[in-house]
Structures are given as C-alpha cells and as structure tokens.
Image (cartoon, helix red, strand yellow):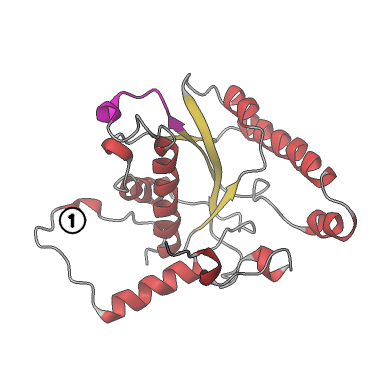
Amino acid sequence: MQDGNQPVNTQRLSQSKEPPEFDTAFRRALRDLMRWRRDVRHFRADPVDRGLVMACLEEACKGPSVGNSQPWRFVFVDTPEARAKVKANFESANADALGSYHGEKAERYARLKLSGLDIAPVQIAVFADLESTEGAGLGARTMPETKAYSVVAAIQCLWLLLRAEGLGLGWVSILEPDRLSADLAAEPGWRFIGHLCIGWPEEAQEHPELEREGWQARLPVERFVKEV
C-alpha cells in the first residue's frame, strides 16, 4: 500500500515481459479487496496527492472497452463554483427522490448519507464519449450502449485500485444528468455516467452502508443465476 505521497510505478509494471503467476495468497487478497471495496460517503478532509489519483486512473484505463474505443472521459471538478453547482444539483435531485417514498421508507431515506460532496477532496465527473471514432465502431454497432458499459468497467477498476491504496471512492448517481453536463461544459456527444468522490475514508467497513442501515440486505447469488 502506498503512503499517499508516492504514485504507483506504472512504468515498472508495464515493462514486465513474463505473465505473472497469481498464487493462493494473491487470490485470497483479491477476494478481500472485493469484499472491502465500499461506496464511501464519509471522508477525512486530508488532501490526496493528484499523482496517486492519476496513476490509478492510468491503470484503470487498461480496463476493457468495446472495440478498444476507450470512451471514458474524466473531468476533475476542482473549483468551488463547479462544486457548488454539483451540490445544488444533488440537493434538488435528492429532494425529488425523497418525495417518491412514503412512511417508514421516507424516514429511513432521509437519514441516509448519500454523498460525500461536502468534504471529499477529489471529485471527478465521468462521461462516455458516444461519438468517439476510436475503435471504428467494432462491437458497438449492434449494442451502442457498450460504450457506456466500458466506462463503468473502468470505474470499477479505479474503485479497486484506489481501495488497494487505502483511498475510498463514492459514486454519486442522485444527479440530473443533462443539468450536470451543462454546468460542467461537457463536450457534445458525452453521456454522463457518474460523479466520483475520492478521499481517505473515516473508517473501513466490510459491509455496505445501505446494508448496515437496513435499507437493503445482501441477496444470495442463487437469486441471480438461471440455467437454460
């Protein structure tokens, strides 16, 4: 694990010519990483080295993309003005969402902390460039939505890479996409995928906050498997 001051040596990693062998200890650690990856909403205010975030982004961009189109676009939201617009968007969308629940569910929703926008030192709005010509449309002609899927795959890679460095990531989806795209001057053809809050978490948690707060229990994998 890095100490937060030294970025990952991606050049050294990329120069390896022999395929690695993943032993039992590594596989166990990988399962631990999956289990301890959390949607973090409680951050410390400590700054995060931009070089460390960029190194993780570089590795995340080695994730799969349809036709090798690499459609991910990352917008660092740094200025107070831009962050204020994102927060105002969230507050409006969150109020609308609250209005869709009633009774005990509404009370439970109102108690949830659903974003880290108030304190996360790093915020990145992520888009999919649907009009990019990279990859020449391979694999995306019949399913154009796979460009957005590719961006989601990169975010998941980033999530795990950051967690391995001790950093937390929170994915904010309670936002009005068109309004956010306009506020952040997104390029034409870019589709908003998610707003990421990144920072040092206040505490590590093995179980999702929504599970701990009784919003939704973890379901067994058998619920999601079908044989034909």
Please check the rendered image and state whether residue 99 is part of the magenta-colored stretch, yes or no.
no
Q: Nearer the viewer, residue 151 or 137?
A: 137
Question: Against 217, is 67 above or below?
Answer: above
**140 relative to 156 in the view: left or right:** left
Determine the residue positioned at 26% across, 26% down.
136
The image shows residue 30 at horizontal and vertical percentages of 37, 71
Q: Secondary structure at mark 1?
A: helix
Q: Nearer the viewer, residue 100 or 78?
A: 100
- The quadrant in which residue 179 appears is top right
Q: Nearer the viewer, residue 173 or 225?
A: 225
Q: Residue furthest bottom?
A: 24
The image shows residue 225 at horizontal and vertical percentages of 48, 65
What amino acid type is highlighted by mark number 1? Arg
Q: Residues within 10 Å of mark 1 (few under 14, many from 20)?
A: few
Question: Against 105, is 72 above or below?
Answer: above
The image shows residue 216 at horizontal and vertical percentages of 69, 64
Determine the residue positioned at 34% across, 56% down.
6
Which residue matches tag 1?
A: 12
Image quarter of the N terminus: bottom left
Image quarter of the C terminus: bottom left
- The quadrant in which residue 21 appears is bottom left
Which segment did they paint magenta? 128-137
Question: Against 114, is 71 above or below?
Answer: above
**35 relative to 201 in the view: left or right:** left
Q: Nearer the viewer, residue 67 or 129?
A: 67
